[in-house]
Amino acid sequence: MGTQKRIGILTSGGDCAGLNAVIRAVVHHAVNTYGWEVLGIRQATQGLMVRPPLASSLTPDKVDPFLTAGGTMLGTTNKGNPFAFPMPDGSLRDRSHEIIEGYRLLGLDALIGIGGDGSLAILQRLAQQGNLNLVGIPKTIDNDVGVTELSIGFDTAVSIATEALDRLHFTAASHSRVMILEVMGRDAGHIAISAGIAGGADIILIPEIPYTINGICQAIKQRQEAGKNYCLVIVAEAVRTEAGESVTLDSDVEQCRLGGIGQYLSKQICSRIDAETRVTVLGHIQRGGTPSPLDRLIGATFGVAAVDLIAEEKYDRVVTWQNRHVRSVSIREAILHYAAVNPEGTLVKTARGLNIYLGD
Ligand code: F6P
């Protein structure tokens, strides 16, 4: 059984499918294998700023019903960096010491933080400052944490985007239209290229590969000339205009929201060739709903591995999925290695081999 411990777990950053599978695995392994106590901390690090901290004991029977549920049973936020926390009067305040104090008030021996690269960087800074025992678990539909081949949530997001293309296929063919599907992914094109190949897109646009409107129009015309009356386009939200401007929904400095590239492309295509276009923005649908079996599987694996790291008192590490195995690397290494789509990589070669227009 080892030493009795009390550990905390929190989810931070944007939610995604599969988070509850991680929480469930952590609770089962920590409680049943090691006999520890697990406290679920609500609303990411903000739950540790509140007095008393927003935390409650998690047991297997409490977490089991959430295995198939989307989102996170602990709540989360992708706003409010504790080192520059926005206050009601508009000022920014460093509230990191309150979080560290919250950890101590709960009497935690260790903390498991589930987050993307931004959240992991914040948690690591907190851990260093407060000497907290931290283990990280990577989650993000964007799949851009470079040290792991898979992050929680990515597989479900790709499944949803692929299903959207499958559905658009028929309506596109019925109306002889160019259907543009805009997907998330932040600065990386992983969702777009994976779903684009899986869903039979004709054009895949990702931020890592430049394109021209002319190239897109040529690809559509070639299809028309070959007797194909419709065209499926998938575009990642961070793709820029032809002139290189990013397309955003607002100008929030902390978390500026991408969106609108689909409409931009639609207008450009219609102004140059004889094609009817429609745009679908998939948005947060990619983050919700039942997690795929793979996200549950990776979630369970990461949860168990994170608890084992704590049992071995190996802190300041992130669990990763590499070559069919769960491993761990230092959090610093995880933050340093951002992974965009490799323009020379396998998926790009595959897409080109399928004659998909990717850019020039
Ligand atoms: O990082 C995950 C993500 O879903 C991105 O793909 C997207 O750009 C962003 O979060 C959306 O954030 P919000 O939930 O704040 O709209």
Image (tube, rainbow, N blue to C red):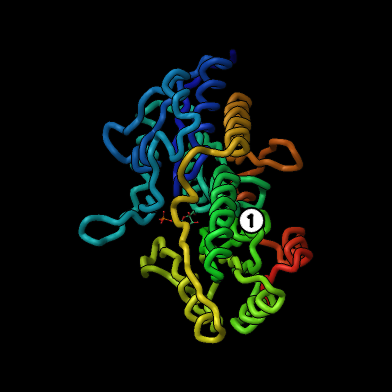
Q: Residue at x 64, y 69 (%)?
A: 203
Which quadrant does the N terminus fall into?
A: top right
Q: Residue pushed farthest bottom?
A: 272
At mark 1, the secondary structure is loop
Q: Report the front residue among 171 and 46.
A: 171
Q: Is residue 168 visible?
A: yes
Which quadrant does the C terminus fall into?
A: bottom right
Q: Which residue is mark 1?
A: 199
Q: Residue at x 60, y 27 (%)?
A: 304
Place residue 227 in its image quadrant.
bottom right
Place residue 193 in its image quadrant.
bottom right
Q: Residues within 10 Å of mark 1 (few under 14, many from 20)?
A: many
Q: Residue at x 43, y 70 (%)?
A: 248
In x, y percent, where is residue 201?
64, 63
With respect to residue 314, does 119 lie above or below?
Answer: below
Q: How many marks?
A: 1
Q: Residue at x 57, y 39 (%)?
A: 292
Q: Is residue 104 left or right of residue 214?
A: left
Q: Report the front residue among 271 and 226.
A: 226
Q: Is residue 84 left or right of residue 357?
A: left
Q: Is residue 314 visible?
A: no
Label 1 is placed on what type of residue? Gly
In x, y percent, where is residue 58?
42, 23
Q: Report the front residue among 227 and 306.
A: 227
In x, y percent, where is residue 359?
67, 75
